[in-house]
């Protein structure tokens, strides 16, 4: 029995080690994408808007790593510049949703009573709309600009962040020691900032990291639907739309290359988010080791 | 010696021979019959969108209306472009016509067997009602209905009279020598039943649309069902008057379903999976070379392609709005700068042509009126050097910014022009708009420049609504207030011989495209539509996909 448990523990630890490697690779990939986006003008070998009809729909090669599109534009350069738009919109949306959602959720959890009830019912109303439907409605109402897209995604994410923050706050508020904290006479904002926010930081960080993936995907979806960055400026979703509509049979690289980068980015954000939250094999191994002490 | 077996053998030969002969006859008959039109069946076509403006042909030239409008309202009005020869005028609701010696008075004799879809006979009073609406609009109290957007194109009418039940007389203020040719434009459809609309107009509802009165038309198909955003279904109209050469009643089809498909990508998937018999007409829905290749590869001989000259892809300026483009030198510089052949693969889907010397491929379009690219025959580098000089001379050597109205369904043209003009220092700010906003903005002065690839009339006299003065032609490509063009169009209408027409038209086009450069013709597009090979009897016009959309002669060879 003991040997079996040791074997099982070994398997779990091996999985945890692999997962750690995957997380590091994911983080490195995200770092690379972020650096490329920040230094797009240096990394991209061509102007992303420059058209050259003579090199139209050229397949991937040493000169054009990802090939060229229907206007003869370098797909790699457009993908790099597109990362700037996609990531900026996603970051802005998640940061906004994080700030508003955290503030609302923590305050709601701390205050309780009618305020909590009101906030949660409003959150319920917002959660009643599917994420993308709400984002679509907002973008259409505001007119499709990157700022509007960021605002729309932020609005769609905020209720979820509120819920996560409130749950974390409630877990602290219900602790016995919190009665002592309250009795010190500290103000509400101080209590929220000093006691609730640190307790909620880890689940919030994990949730926001995963939300970043959701936001990147949402931005791409909205751009795919023609509601994101206007042409000819590149964004991943718009590139997918342009390629899939006109050239998917003749030049699949126009769609597949930015599509692959988009998929990898979203996947890496989810992996990193899981790592922060403590889900995944490593956490399982840790739990396994902890439980062993009680056997 | 008697052989008992011989007789039966003789007996069996006869029926065998008879069977073989019958089979042969049947096979030969079938072969010939394969080309004989068959009645019945449902044709399923994609349509680019819901027909705008309440299906009112007086207020929109959108192909989303005219793809459907041919079946509902017919291929013409009093006259039509002949199915056999696009450039000849054929009778439609009128059997014949005559003009006064000075070409100012035209009299049409109408047919007596044309009926509205609700069973009411079409009369000269109906025709008068339609022409009155076209030329003069309507007024009821304070409510005003403007004339049709193409009113000016037909000439300046002073009077429309119904002489009796079947004779209509139109009097013009000027000589109008080519009136029937201009009138044969398929956009000018009679979609306005007097007996249904006149009472509403008199009651103050002056902007009543064909949709408001149930889409009662005169075409080969009547409305079956209209579900907004989804389907326009039309069914055979049994009292339709046209007959085929054998004397059989048209149309052959029982029904046409127009499936509303704004997304060309979804349309491609539907067509390739066999859910459509034909693709939609309209920019973005017309096939590119890459999409055509994919269709051919997947569907082989079960698909064929209709090709028609699609009109001119052009950049047009709103010179009534303040900006550097009000200077003719700036507009000329822009015209010189653009690498026109580069537009064909990138902005026109690979189908197009830029000069008569290259030729319009396999499309038989008469080119006697087409001379615009010959103005700029110098090599590109020389033209661009001249463009820079003109910009500097006009005081815009460092460039400027210019707004550019672009349809959301086809941004490729805007993207192409933006990249082209960046080299000249012109920052083209694309204002990408949906179809509703496009239809509003294009007749307004709320933009700096616009582009598109609309097909004007194939005869020069019919182009005033797109090239004329804004005050008289709100839908004109370029917005200007140049009365010299009024004079040129007047001279064009008064020209009688072909030589005179060609001379004046070349004067008009030189003035428009070169001396003033209100419009920069970039390239001539070719529109490509796919049909399943069992769709037979289709009339493909050599140009202008608004034409012959009645599908009266179409039959299905499944």
Image (cartoon, rainbow, N blue to C red):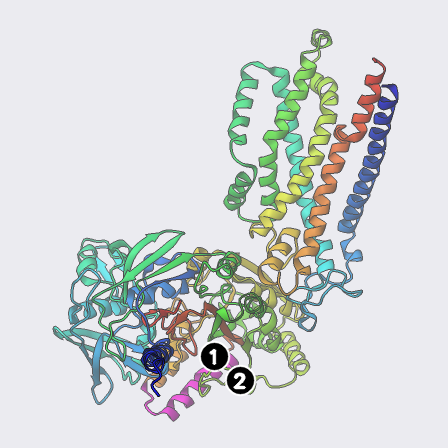
Determine the CA span between mark 1 and mark 2. Answer: 22 Å
The x and y percentages for residue A147 are: 61, 45
Single out the mark in the foreground, 1 or 2: 2
Residues marked 1 and 2 touching at CB (< 8 Å): no
For the residue carrying disc 2, how many other residues have a C-alpha within 10 Å: few (<14), some (14-19), or many (20+)?
Answer: some
- Dividing the picture into quadrants, the one containing residue B482 is bottom left
Q: Where is residue B501 in the image (x, y as percent from the top left)?
A: 38, 88
Density class for disc 1 (Cα within 10 Å; few <14, some 14-19, many ≥20) is many
* Residue at image coords 50%, 79%: B513
What residue is shown with label 2? Answer: B359
Local SS, label 1: helix
Q: Earlier in the sequence, mark 1 or mark 2?
A: 2
Q: Residue B146: which numbered mark, if any? A: none
Subunit ID for the residue under disc 1: B
Left or right, A122 with respect to A95, comes to left
Q: Mark 1 points at which residue?
A: B512
- Give residue A67's quadrant in the image: bottom right
**Residue at x-position 77% and y-position 49%:** A38
Residues B281 and B389: in front is: B281
């Amino acid at each position: 029995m003991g040997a079996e448990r040791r074997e099982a523990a070994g398997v779990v630890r091996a999985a945890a080690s692999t997962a750690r490697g995957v997380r590091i690779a994911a983080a490195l990939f995200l770092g690379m994408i972020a650096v490329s986006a920040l230094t797009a003008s240096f990394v991209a070998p061509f102007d992303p808007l420059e058209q050259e009809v003579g090199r139209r729909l050229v397949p991937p090669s040493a000169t054009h790593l990802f090939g060229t599109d229907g206007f003869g534009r370098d797909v790699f350069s457009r993908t790099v510049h597109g990362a700037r738009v996609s990531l900026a919109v996603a970051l802005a949306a998640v940061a906004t949703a994080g700030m508003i959602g955290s503030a609302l959720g923590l305050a709601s959890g701390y205050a309780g009573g009618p305020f909590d009830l009101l906030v949660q019912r409003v959150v319920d109303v917002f959660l009643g709309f599917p994420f993308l439907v709400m984002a679509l409605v907002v973008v259409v109402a505001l007119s499709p600009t990157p700022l509007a897209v960021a605002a729309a995604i932020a609005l769609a994410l905020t209720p979820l962040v509120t819920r996560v923050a409130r749950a974390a706050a409630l877990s602290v508020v219900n602790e016995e020691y919190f009665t002592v904290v309250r009795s010190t006479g500290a103000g509400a904002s101080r209590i929220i900032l000093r006691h609730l926010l640190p307790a909620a930081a880890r689940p919030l960080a994990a949730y926001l990291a995963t939300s970043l993936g959701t936001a990147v995907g949402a931005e791409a979806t909205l751009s795919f639907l023609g509601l994101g960055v206007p042409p000819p400026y590149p964004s991943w979703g718009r590139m997918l739309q342009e390629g899939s509509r006109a050239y998917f049979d003749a030049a699949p690289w126009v769609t597949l290359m930015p599509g692959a980068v988009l998929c990898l980015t979203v996947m890496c954000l989810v992996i990193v988010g899981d790592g922060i939250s403590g889900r995944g094999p490593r956490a399982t191994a840790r739990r396994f080791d902890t439980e062993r002490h009680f056997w | 010696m008697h052989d008992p077996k011989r007789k039966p053998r003789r007996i069996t030969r006869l029926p065998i021979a008879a069977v073989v002969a019958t089979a042969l006859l049947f096979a030969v008959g079938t072969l010939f019959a394969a080309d004989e039109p068959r009645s019945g069946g449902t044709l399923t076509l994609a349509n680019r969108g819901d027909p705008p403006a309440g299906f009112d042909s007086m207020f929109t030239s959108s192909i989303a209306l005219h793809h459907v409008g041919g079946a509902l309202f017919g291929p013409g009005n009093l006259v039509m472009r002949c199915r056999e020869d696009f450039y000849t005028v054929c009778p439609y609701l009128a059997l014949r016509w005559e003009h006064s010696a000075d070409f100012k008075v035209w009299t049409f004799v109408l047919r007596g067997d044309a009926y509205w879809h609700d069973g009411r006979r079409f009369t000269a009073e109906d025709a008068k009602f339609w022409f009155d609406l076209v030329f003069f609009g309507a007024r009821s109290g304070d409510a005003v209905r403007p004339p049709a957007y193409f009113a000016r194109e037909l000439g300046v009418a002073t009077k429309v009279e119904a002489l009796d039940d079947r004779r209509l007389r139109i009097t013009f203020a000027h000589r109008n020598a080519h009136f029937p040719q201009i009138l044969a434009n398929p956009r000018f459809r009679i979609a306005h039943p007097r007996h249904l609309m006149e009472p509403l107009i008199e009651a103050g509802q002056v902007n009543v649309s064909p949709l408001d009165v149930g889409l009662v038309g005169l075409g080969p198909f009547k409305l079956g069902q209209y579900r907004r955003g989804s389907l326009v279904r039309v069914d055979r109209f049994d009292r339709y008057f046209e007959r085929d050469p054998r004397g059989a009643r048209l149309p052959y089809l029982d029904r046409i379903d127009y499936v509303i498909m704004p997304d060309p990508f979804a349309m491609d998937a539907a067509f390739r999976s066999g859910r459509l018999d034909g693709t939609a007409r309209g920019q973005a829905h017309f096939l590119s070379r890459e999409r055509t290749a994919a269709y051919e590869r997947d569907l082989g001989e079960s698909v064929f392609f209709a090709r028609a000259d699609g009109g001119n892809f052009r950049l047009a300026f709103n010179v009534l709005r303040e900006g550097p483009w009000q200077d003719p030198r700036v507009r000329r510089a822009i015209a010189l700068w653009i690498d026109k052949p580069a537009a064909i693969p990138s902005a026109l889907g690979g189908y197009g042509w830029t000069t008569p010397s290259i030729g319009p491929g396999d499309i038989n379009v008469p080119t006697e009126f087409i001379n615009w690219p010959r103005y700029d025959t110098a090599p590109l580098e020389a033209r661009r050097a001249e463009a820079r000089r003109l910009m500097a001379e006009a005081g815009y050597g460092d460039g400027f910014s210019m707004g550019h109205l672009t349809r959301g369904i086809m941004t490729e043209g805007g993207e192409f022009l933006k990249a082209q003009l960046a080299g000249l220092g012109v920052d083209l700010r694309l204002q990408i708009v949906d179809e509703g906003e496009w239809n509003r903005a294009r007749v307004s002065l709320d933009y700096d420049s616009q582009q598109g690839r609309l097909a004007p009339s194939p005869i020069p006299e019919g182009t005033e609504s797109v090239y004329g003065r804004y005050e008289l032609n709100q839908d004109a490509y370029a917005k200007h207030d140049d009365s010299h063009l009024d004079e040129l169009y007047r001279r064009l209408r008064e020209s009688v011989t072909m030589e005179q027409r060609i001379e004046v038209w070349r004067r008009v086009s030189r003035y428009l495209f070169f001396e003033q450069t209100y419009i920069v013709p970039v390239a001539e597009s070719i529109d490509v539509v796919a049909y399943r090979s069992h769709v037979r009897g289709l009339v493909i016009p050599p140009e202008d996909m608004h034409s012959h959309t009645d599908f009266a002669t179409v039959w299905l060879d499944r």
